[in-house]
Amino acid sequence: MSIQTVHRAGGPERPVRIAPQFFGMGIIKLKAAFDYPLHQHKRYEVILVREGVYRCTLNEKALTLEPGEILLIGPGDYHQDFCDPPLQYFAFQFQFDVRGPGPTKLLSDDVTPDLQHTQADLAVFWPLVEAIQNESDIGDLVAPLVQDALLEEFFWRLVRALPTEALHEQFLSFTAVSALPIRLLRLFQTHIAENLSVADMARRLHMSQSALAHTCKAILGAPPARLFLQCRMDYARRLLATSCLSVKQVAGRVGFDDPYHFSRTFKKIIGRSPSESRR
């Protein structure tokens, strides 16, 4: 028997969730021409074209979407549809909970219509649409929950596909901050036997040193160097408890050439010596 373990990206911890609230959705298939008059959106709307050509205006800008293209319309946008058969597309609406701790805006305040549509891989997106439709056909108590999970995956794949300059700074900032503990843990685990400086950490996380230090202090309560040292000592404690490695060998596993320096640091962080921890 062959078992391939699939690890959670970034480690076991989950970031603070950004959970959009989803509304009306459907697969639209046109057999006759249809024009929808100019209207202003109150929520975000997503349109993914599977077949035919979808034409519209978005804030007075004429757009044409072909199969595999996706459009994100924002609250306050003026939108008008000009639909000619054969045409098939999937559409749904969503909004953010303004009372929650997460972001309230996805699109930048100065985003242009050209940045609000992008190429989408139908081989990735359309199976999600079919799975959402399948849950509608099942219609049991669990189906709405599965649909929401599938729509969340659709949402995050859309975010990945959009150009970064289309996204609001608030959304980008919240996403980066909420994911920082996971990114840090992955970085620490990858370099557990090294003496990473704060400059090294910041460079690998694509942050400035000051931003990294401020964010770590704000959401994790300690400077990044202290967090890394804590991670190394926690790993050393687990090795002492679960292996027959000597203290010198454990010290080497967490990047200490001098076992006496390691022992002093371990006791300072953990509160007891390595030998006491092993007992």
Image (cartoon, rainbow, N blue to C red):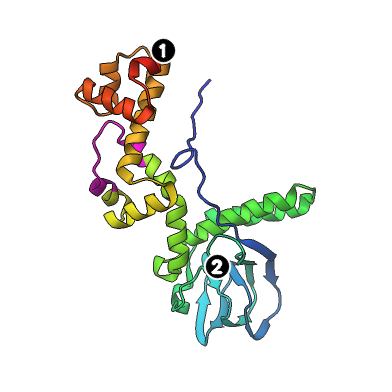
Kind of residue sitting beneath label 2: Thr
> Picture quarter containing residue 249?
top left
Question: Was residue 161 drawn as part of the magenta stretch in this picture?
Answer: no
- Residue identified by numbered label 1: 279
User: Could you tell me which secondary element the residue under label 2 belongs to?
Assistant: loop
- Residue identified by numbered label 2: 104
User: Could you tell me which secondary element the residue under label 1 belongs to?
Assistant: loop
Q: Which residue range is magenta in the image? A: 187-201
Between 116 and 228, the one lying in front of the other is 228
How crowded pointer 1 is (Cα within 10 Å; few <14, some 14-19, many 20+) is rated as few
- Tell me residue 248's x, y (percent): 25, 17
How crowded pointer 2 is (Cα within 10 Å; few <14, some 14-19, many 20+) is rated as some
Q: In this rendering, does residue 75 appear at all?
A: yes
Between 144 and 264, the one lying in front of the other is 264
Q: How many marks?
A: 2
- Tell me residue 145's x, y (percent): 70, 50
| Foreground: disc 1 or disc 2 | 1
Left-right relation of 233 to 125: left
